Image (tube, rainbow, N blue to C red):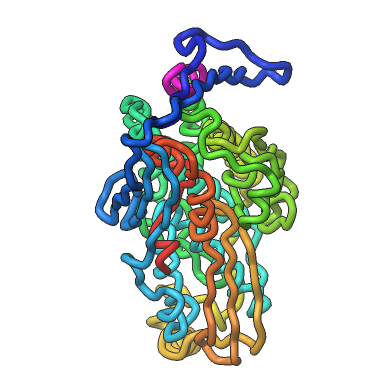
Amino acid sequence: MAEKRVLELALATPGVDAAGNPARLPLVVETPRTAEPELDTDHMLINIGPQHPATHGVLRLVVELDGEVVVRVIPHIGYLHSGFEKLGEYRHYNQIIPLTDRTDYLSAPANNVAFALAAEQLMGIEITERCTVLRVIACELSRIISHLVWAGTTAIDIGAFTVFLWMFQERERAYNLIEEWTGARLTTSLTRVGGLMADVPDGWTGRLKEWCAKFPKTLDEVDRMLLRNGIWLGRTQDVGVMTAAEAIDYSLSGPMLRASGVAFDVRKDHPYLDYDSYDFEVPVGQHGDVYDRYLVRMEEMRQSVRILEQALARLPDGPINAADARVILPPKRRLMSDMESMIHHFKQVMEGVPAPAGEVYVPVENPKGELGTYLVSDGTAKPVRWRIRPPSFLNIAALPKMAEGHLLSDLIAINASVDIVMGEIDR
């Protein structure tokens, strides 16, 4: 018989601990009865996916079960393989940006920024102050949008349908802002090497400020529904635990790592885009379970709002693109009347922008963890090698460890807590 775990006082409202965090409900473990020899059965293999809503993409999980207890999980990937990294070897640097949209397609602007930073470091390009702040805004909006999708889909996996509706309503409002800026909602292609594809329209910063003022109220409402909910606590506490040492050994990053008690954030430890000048906290969990991953991501959204408000307050006037005719396309109004501008336009579009020979690795703190971009140049306009360090790929490797010994229903919650995107895994 599978181990039966019963929540003590499941419907009671728990208090808070000394740090002010919700108290964790104690678990009473009932020792399973010894099965009669004649009732012993063989282990069973089942497939979850690759076409299953709870796998969050074309992921196939081959699960070995002893009754309802998970003995082993084997993730099978590769069903969405698109060859992004190989495609990048045949494209100019700016032509690669639309490919970055489609890796982690829930945080396309942040992916665009990550690649542009690597290409600019390789080429020795300095971006403008306004571009720097606008890229911070793009990254933090991406973080919120990605976490909203995670919270909504995880809640619906566990049965909290109302949370799904609330989160996706806020996501639509955020996407409306993204659409005003870029003309697209999902795949934005926001950046260019040396700048951005467009500046924000008139009145946009005011609308973002209004959204930042209202959005935390939704997070508070979700917390009121879930934070001390007996069913939510029973499905998430002490489920899928990863200790700090285990999280480091598995090379986890992002909320998965911080929920296990490791306060590592690329924005703090290896600052980029002047993140070291922003005032924000790095949320850290204590138990490394599904519940702590929920707490960490919810607090990260609040911290992202803090960063957005600071970015809006410091957003300077000025150009969004570097004053470098080698890498920035000339304005269209000059293209048809100035011969030099036409030459620059032709050379950039037809020949691309050559990068000095060398290599560079640039990490950024994406919503799912550390996204690294590795570029190798041989002096031409196309990289010899484009390699991505995808956080989803490394995080999903810990799934067998987290699921072992849990019930089959717990596996769904654990897999959801990892927050994977298959486009990033099957790159």
> 194 and 241: which one is in front?
241
Q: Main secondary structure of the magenta part?
A: helix
Q: Is residue 230 located in the magenta-colored stretch of the structure?
A: yes
Where's residue 301, x and y in %? 54, 37
- Work out which residue is located at the far left of the displayed protein and give it: 51
Position of residue 98 relative to residue 300, above or below, is below
Q: Quadrant of the C terminus?
A: bottom left
Q: How many marks?
A: 0
Q: Is residue 247 left or right of residue 164?
A: right
- Point out residue 100 in the picture as x, y percentages from the top left corner: 44, 66
The residue that appears at 51% across and 46% down in the rendered structure is 143
Residue 370, image quadrant = bottom right
**Residue drawn at point x = 47 percent, y = 41 percent:** 417
Q: Which residues are magenta?
A: 221-234
Q: Which residue does the image show at 35% across and 49% down from the upper left?
A: 56
Q: Residue sitting at 50 percent across and 78 percent down?
A: 93
Q: Is residue 351 above or below residue 112?
A: below
User: Is 6 on the left-hand or right-hand side of 274?
Assistant: left
In x, y percent, where is residue 171?
A: 38, 39
Instruction: State the quadrant of the N terminus.
Output: top left
In this view of the protein, can residue 167 be seen by the observer?
A: no
The image shows residue 61 at horizontal and vertical percentages of: 36, 53
Picture layout, residue 238 above or below residue 190: above
The answer to whether residue 167 is left or right of residue 322 is left
Residue 10 included in the magenta stretch of the image: no
Q: Is residue 48 above or below residue 327?
A: above
